[in-house]
Amino acid sequence: MESIVIRGGRPLHGEVTVSGAKNSALAIMAATILQGDEHKISGMPGLRDIATMKKLLQYLGAEISGSDELIINTGNIACQEAPYELVKTMRASFLVLGPLVARFGRAKVSLPGGCAIGLRPVDYHIKALEAMGVSITIDKGYVHAVCSKLKGASILFDMPTVGATENVMMAACLAKGTTTIKNAAREPEVVELAKALRHMGAYIKGEGTDTIVVEGERPLQPLAYRVMPDRIEAGTLIVAGGITGGDIRILNCPVECMGSTLEKLRDIGIDIEEDKDVVRVRRKGDLQPVEITTHPYPGFPTDMQAQVMALLTVTKGTSIIRETVFENRFIHVAELDRMGAHIKVEHDTAVVTGVKQLKGASVMATDLRASASLILAGLAAEGTTVVSRVYHLDRGYESLDKKLYKLGADIQRQQV
């Protein structure tokens, strides 16, 4: 087991490059199942979740080589089962359901796991695929899907859902007729998947809006695609520069899809200068309290809530954060309070009263974004912070500790 040790109080300086987006990469990897050939995906981040998806595709029969550029040959896939042992650790594994049933007419996929941040049922995935002609049963923790031929359908989600939107988009590429997804997720990663599918020959329009249209049965071809930069990693690095009062340049930053995040960080008092895909981050004066409500894109992302909460713990005044996406996404609050933060939670709302100085402490990461939040707090704290269970961090951040060290942080991993 590893932990990360941080001795806080050092302003960050220098340059850092944002890695490829985990959530985009995982969906595009799943999409390669649709067409049995050799695909190339570049700009891949080195993450535990990527390694898990590689293992899953290999279990199905794909041949995979490379790291930054993955070569994925899905021509010899003979298995249509995604086992519990692989799916339990990462919810994105469930994205193989749509491509498998679309290409092979059957799939057996374990119900998913992932971070303990709240209930994320797969009902939307199942109901949508049933509307497309798939017969689905759930038995002993597995989804069994069978279909002689997928057919296009009009699908209306009760609320935007990224995973279900992606699963339906992929399945619809091989369905007979037209599929219309209404109240579709608008996240940039959904847009990237649509672009990748279009590169394969699919007909898709409307991505980035609440209505996506897919015309099925277009001939598909091998994919060659580069993964977009990770907007959540970029936001986390901006917070790191701001919370330490440093001066850093962030390269490969996807500013075009970070509007709500950049707006709030500027409101808090971080100076962010944009120059195409490069931003300079500084802090001028005291940090200011704000009110934040998380929403699906283009609203403020739930995946930035924990990191910004760490920043708000050292503002002058009281901030309000309302979490509307996941019901358990305040479980990092108790760990921040161990470091001297003053946070009160009632139902879906956290009241953050800024303190003059956080204090180093031993804390435990409870999920992916919570781990980043605690590291950010440790950068600003007086004394030493030890963050345990950092395997959560490695699921979604490529070498974050090394990147922060390069910027001047006193941070290191240790075996415990």
Image (tube, rainbow, N blue to C red):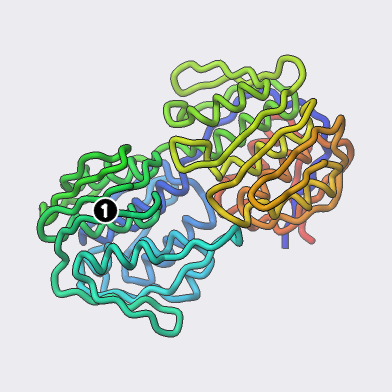
- Residue occupied by mark 1: 169
Label total for image: 1
x, y percentage for residue 103?
20, 66
* In the image, residue 403 above or below residue 30: above
Q: Residue at x 35, y 40 (%)?
A: 226
Q: Nearer the viewer, residue 70 or 274?
A: 274
From the top left corner, tell me how far across and down residue 190 is, in percent. Answer: 35, 45
Q: Which residue is drawn at 27% across and 61% down?
A: 33
Q: In which quarter of the image is the N terminus?
A: bottom right
Asked whether residue 242 is in view, the answer is yes
| Front residue (pair 99, 150) | 150
Q: What element carries label 1?
A: helix
Can residue 79 be seen from the camera position used here? no
Coordinates of residue 145 in the picture (x, y in percent) = 28, 75
Q: In which quarter of the image is residue 243?
A: top right
**Label 1, residues with CA under 10 Å away: few <14, some 14-19, many ≥20:** many
Residue at the bottom extreme, as displayed: 140
Amino acid under disc 1: Met
Q: Quadrant of the C terminus?
A: bottom right
Above-or-below relation of 41 to 37: above
Q: In which quarter of the image is residue 291?
A: top right
Relative to 299, 400 lies left or right? right
Q: In the figure, is residue 140 to the left or right of 409?
A: left
Residue 37 in percent (x, y) is at: 21, 58
In percent of the image, x 69 and y 23: which residue is there?
13
Q: Residue at x 79, y 31 (%)?
A: 314
Q: Which of 310 and 330 is in front in this view?
A: 330
Q: In this view, does 214 lie to the left or right of 191?
A: left
